[in-house]
Amino acid sequence: MAAPKKGRGPSGGHGRPGRALALILIAMVALTGGLFLSGHTTPRLGIDLAGGTSITLEAQNQPGKPNAINQTNMDTAVGIIERRVNGLGVSEAEVQTQGSKNIIVNIPKGTNSKQAQEQVGTTAQLYFRPVLTVQASGPEAPTPSGSATPTGSATPKPGESAEGEDKAKGEDKPEGEEATGTEATPSASATTQGRAVTGALKKDDPTPGASDKPKPSDSPEASPSADPATAKLQEEFAKLDCTDPKQRTDAGKNAKPTDTIVACGSNVPGSYEKYILGPAEVSGSDVDDAKGAIEQQTGEWIVSMEFTSKGAKKFQTITSRLSQQQPPMNQFAIVLDGEVVSAPSVRTALSKNAQISGSFTQQSAEDLGNILSYGALPLTFKEVSVTTVTAALGSEQLQAGLIAGAIGLALVIIYLVVYYRGLAFIALLSLLVSGILTYTIMALLGPAIGFALNLPAVCGAIVAIGITADSFIVYFERVRDEIREGRTLRPAIERAWPRARRTILVSDFVSFLAAAVLFIVTVGKVQGFAFTLGLTTLLDVVVVFLFTKPLMTLMGRTKFFSSGGPWSGLDPKRLGAQPPLRRSRRVNAPTEPKEA
């Protein structure tokens, strides 16, 4: 009879545990080195731990829109404010509604928090309006000799009398800053006053008359009409004093896009101009993207805008029409929240791209670009209160949480030492590795993705201690079960691993799935708990596969564990091991002789 073939050992064999341990050691060294090289050796803290600012915004009723304050507009405003703040790199900012009219914005202390505070309630209603009349503004500013017809277009329509145009041809063009760009026709430029806006702006050296006060138009199109609305607008224009901060802010505020309005602007710091502006022809919703950048030729900060395809057509139409007019009716004003940011003169049609330049700092250019990129708020908000949040309460709660976590960790260690004895050494080293990986990754995620550690996130990390310890216990018990069945330690370690691996993966998958669902369906601080729980669950798998199992294999080769001593935690007698079963040869009973 042929001898039976020797069966193959269990899958997963002894392998090369040193490679796995070297891999996780390299990962720990790399993460720790990155921690010190980045300069962020501690995790970023949320508002409940580090303190910050809490802002309450109240939605205001708008003229002609009695039902504007509704849940849809409030939710839209929350989303826009949150994107603006996150666009500045401020993490863990909480934006949520309170009641039917209020929005609460919590900004943690740290990088760009003050800058974000200045932007949260900015409406950012952007419109491009044709200039009908412009005049220097002040307590003793002269009355304009002509004014634009507020109710009509600033551009002569085909077929209308050209008498005014013939007279206007003899007027001198005002001197100002020169700008060129991406235009609809070649070799064209736009003359600007104050900040410049063109297709790809380049601001040349100002000419001697650039700082002169703008002059009102004397063109026939600027003659006032006799209707009451025009008379009222002229009266508002005459009384407007743009040196008064309140009048300057309220001048064009809450106006409809279709209205003819009066507004204020400033070309030179300390001096102001007042305008009569026609109905808006291009709006901020026609801007596809905007960002602050440095103009390469001049080295000045600008705001670069790119229009949508629909907005580009509108922009080309308005600049094409205005380029045929005489000053100041060849200007269009860029109006942000009722204030004229710039009022460039147009000499030719401009197309898709535009830039705003002139007297920008890096912060102001980035602020305006950030606001325009994420859109205008659907409502106007009033800042009701600004409260500074101290970290004292959060620190007390954090201290209490850390004490509770330390007590829980100590109880886990005591249990492991009493019940598993020598195996507790492997479990404690695994917990230490898991803690190092968790800390370094959290610290690096702060500058990388804006992750900030708050109290719920700390709770998630404490809960993860139990999840990690549970994985060790599953594996240890599988090994002890194999020893109870009469196997020696080294085969028991390898045979127990496949069964323990399946259990660990299923358990961790359920925990990670719960964390992912919680992260998706919740907002605010609860997401911090879900994120930390999911992260530590993934790290548990890494530690068990790359550290605990290889270390267990190496320890099984030592005399302390393989001998099964009382303090190893693998004593066969204490575990109630059964002697190995042996097959006995079956003896056939003798047969009785048959009777004759």
Image (cartoon, rainbow, N blue to C red):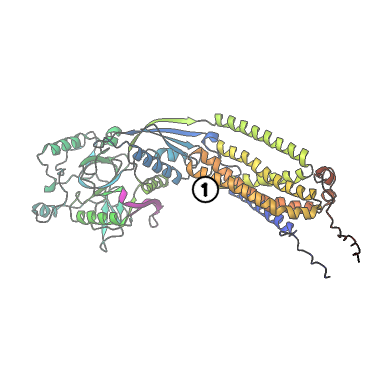
Give the residue displayed 67% in from the left and 50% down from the top: 543
- The front one of 457 and 309 is 457
Give the residue displayed 65% in from the left and 35% down from the top: 405
**Rendered position, 122 above or below 482:** above
Left or right of residue 358, residue 130 in this image: left
Q: Quadrant of residue 121?
A: top left
Residue under numbered circle 1: 449
Left or right of residue 354, residue 427 in this image: right
Q: Please say whether residue 261 is visible from this viewpoint.
A: yes
Q: Is 531 inside the magenta-drawn segment?
A: no
Q: Which residues are magenta?
A: 285-307
Image label count: 1
Spot occupied by residue 562 in the image (x, y as percentages of width and height): 83, 51
Q: Please say whether residue 39 is visible from this viewpoint.
A: no
Left or right of residue 344, residue 534 in this image: right
- The front one of 56 and 420 is 420
Mark 1: amino acid: Ile
Q: Is 296 inside the magenta-drawn segment?
A: yes
- The front one of 578 and 99 is 578
Spot occupied by residue 501 in the image (x, y as percentages of width and height): 67, 52
Name the quarter where the C terminus is drawn.
bottom right
